[in-house]
Image (spheres, rainbow, N blue to C red):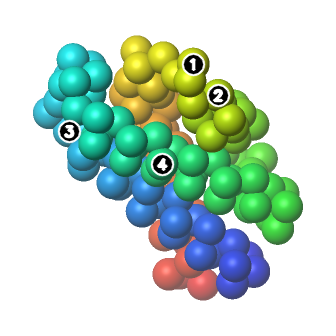
Amino acid sequence: MFQPKSWTLLEDIDHACRYILRTTNGRTLADYESDETMRLAVERSFENIGEALLRLERTEPAAIDQITEPRQVIAFRNRLAHGYDIIENPRVWEIITTTLPRLHAEVRVFLSKEHTQ
C-alpha cells in the first residue's frame, strides 16, 4: 500500500500525461514547432512529470522500479528546466510519441490498483 502522497504524485503524473497526449493528439512535429503556447505547456507538463517521479522515487522506491526508464524521464525534466536554451523539438516530439504513452500506461496500472485496495 502506497503512502497518500505517493497516490497524489501518481495522479499528478497521470494528469500531465493526459494533458500532453490530448494537446498533441492529431498534431505533427511541424505543428508543435510552430505553436509556442503548446510547446511551453508541454514542456511544463514534462517538468511536472519528472519532478513527481523524483519525489515518488524518494517515497516509493519499489514503485519506481516498475516504471520504464524513470531516471531518463527525470533527466529529461532537468534538461527542460535547466537547459531550456538547448531544447531540441524533434527530441521532445519523439518522447511524446514513444516514451510518454508507455509511462502513462504504467502509471495507470498503479492508479487502477488504488481503487481495488
Q: Which residue lies under the disc numbered 3?
A: 25
Question: In terms of secondary structure, where does tag 4 sit?
Answer: helix
State yes or no: discs 3 and 2 in contact (Cβ < 8 Å): no
Instruction: Give coordinates of residue 48: x percent, y percent.
Output: 56, 55
Q: Quadrant of residue 90?
A: top left
Does the image show residue 94?
Answer: no
Neighbours of disc 1 within 10 Å: few (<14), some (14-19), many (20+):
few
**Amino acid type, callout 4:** Arg
Q: Is residue 51 above or below residue 100?
A: below
Residue that numbered label 4 is attached to: 44
Residue 39: which quarter of the image? top left
Residue type beneath disc 3: Asn
Query: Marks 3/1: CA distance?
Result: 25 Å
Q: Which numbered dot is residue 21?
A: none
In the rendered image of this protein, does residue 72 appear above or below residue 3? Answer: above
At 68% from the left and 35% from the top, the residue drawn is 82
Query: Which badge, 3 or 2, is on the more N-terminal residue?
Result: 3
Q: Secondary structure at mark 1?
A: helix
As measured in the structure, the alpha-carbon distance from the residue carrying label 4 to the one carrying label 3 is 17 Å
Q: Quadrant of the N terminus?
A: bottom right
Residue tagged 2: 83
Instruction: State which tag comes first along the sequence, 4 or 3.
Output: 3
58 with respect to 92 (left or right): right
Q: Nearer the viewer, mark 4 or mark 3?
A: 4
Asked whether residue 15 appears in the rendered view, the answer is yes
Q: Nearer the viewer, mark 3 or mark 2?
A: 2
Question: Badges 2 and 1: C-beta atoms under 8 Å apart?
Answer: yes
Labels 3 and 1: the sequence-earlier one: 3
